[in-house]
Every structure is written in structure tokens, then in C-alpha cells.
Amino acid sequence: MLLEANSLKYAHSGQKVMTFPDVKLDAGEALLILGKSGSGKTTLLNILAGLLAPIQGEVILDGVKLTSLQGQKLDMFRGKNIGIVFQKPHLVAALPVRQNLELVHFFSKKKGQDIDQLLTELGIHHKAKSSVLTLSEGEAQRVSIARALANSPKLILADEPTSSLDDENTENVIQLLKVQAAKIGAALVIVTHDHRVKNQVSNYIEVKSA
Ligand SMILES: Nc1ncnc2c1ncn2[C@@H]1O[C@H](COP(=O)(O)OP(=O)(O)OP(=O)(O)O)[C@@H](O)[C@H]1O
């Protein structure tokens, strides 16, 4: 098992305790996190990313107990092993596409994937030298996927990656994530309430507010 999350609970300050379903994923597998607005999907994704520490339970990625790591060790582990695609691309506006990806190699201190090949596979190599400010939403989202994959992570986390995309781009983006996850042997977790995504990934868990 590449990714395991067991008995997770979390409470935002002043809020009630949320209880999450367990997660078990093998390399190359994809999972959707479904649930109503406010049920805790993003909170669960942030726990899997080690960005929030649960009050109970554990997350194990590739044999390492993420929930026992702290500070710099946790940051280094995340930089090497986890790629995150946010709802909005959050690219570095001052840098062109290529340098946005080179930053990942720099910070993860890992060779990772070949940037030219990655940009080609995602169909945006012709934009390598472009300012990220000139990209369409679909292109910017593909760059943010390339960035999440650049360090060849073991775990790819995506939070509503298709919410601002049209049908064609939605299908492409999910397909790209699935193909890339399978290629690098990563586990893929996607938070969504986009019904279009449910047609492409059958494996899911549902987060319910108590
Ligand atoms: N930083 C925070 N401080 C306090 N409460 C928070 C914080 N972040 C989220 N919450 C609350 O925790 C609950 C779960 O939020 P979360 O963002 O995980 O839900 P979600 O299922 O991802 O929602 P959506 O589908 O609307 O994005 C909500 O009630 C939200 O208001």
C-alpha cells in the first residue's frame, strides 16, 4: 500500500470535530474525495499533504508516517514526495513557465522529471518561455499540473482542479493526471464536486459532516 490514512479526525479552532473515512491507495491508483460543500474535503486533502496535523489518526506514505514528521523534516518530505495541484494555479507571475517548473527542482533538491518532456506531454511546450500571465485558464492549470509532477512525487493531490475549466479541458486535465500518476507510479487523490470528473475516476470516498 503506497498511501494509507487511518482514523483521521480534525477540528478547526472553535469548530466541531470532523471524522474522515480511511484511505488506502496503491501506486498508480486514483481516488476521488466527494462530499457536500463544507463537509471537510479540502481539510482532508491538507491533512494528507501534511499541511494540517490531525488530532487523531495517521497518514503513512510509502512506509513513512507523515503525521509523525514536523518542521523542516516534514517540509523536506513534502517537497520530495508530494505534488499539489490547487484550485487556482498559484504560479509565480514574475517568472515564465519554464522557470516556474525549475523552482520545483531547486526546492526539492531532486532531479525529478525532465521539464521539456513534461511540458511536451502536457501539450504546453510552445509556452515554455511565455509569461504565466499570458496563459489561458486551461493552459495555466496544465502548467500547475506540470509543476506538481516535476519532482516525480509519490503522491499527487489535486483540489478541485477542474472547477474553472470547460468540458474538453476538464476531460484532458483528469486524463493527464491519471496517465502521469500511472507513469510515475504515484497515488492520485482528487477533491471534486464536479460530476464530469466522476465519469473518469470510479474509485471514491465520501466525506460527511457529522
Ligand atoms: N481555517 C479555518 N478555520 C475555521 N474553520 C475552517 C477553516 N477552514 C475550513 N473551516 C471550516 O471547516 C469545514 C470544512 O471546510 P473544508 O474547506 O474542508 O470543506 P470542503 O468540503 O472542502 O468545502 P468546499 O466544497 O465548499 O470547498 C467548513 O465548515 C469550514 O467553514
Image (cartoon, grey):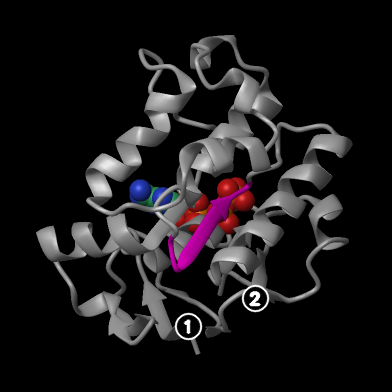
Give amino acid for label 1: Leu
Q: Is residue 36 visible?
A: no
Give amino acid for label 2: Glu
Label 2 Cα neighbours within 10 Å, binned few <14 / some 14-19 / many ≥20: some
Count of residue discs: 2
- Foreground pick, 125 / 192: 125
Q: Position of residue 168 (x, y in %)?
A: 87, 37
Which residues lie in the magenta part? Answer: 153-160
Q: Which residue lies under the disc numbered 1?
A: 2
Q: Position of residue 155 (x, y in %)?
A: 47, 66
Q: Position of residue 99 (x, y in %)?
A: 38, 25
Residue at figure coordinates x 39%, y 78% from the top left: 9
Residue at figure coordinates x 57%, y 82% from the top left: 25
Among the two numbered marks 1 and 2 on one chain, the one whose residue lies closer to the N terminus = 1
In the rendered image, the quadrant that contains the C terminus is: bottom right
Quarter where residue 23 is shown = bottom right
Secondary structure of the residue carrying tag 1 is: loop
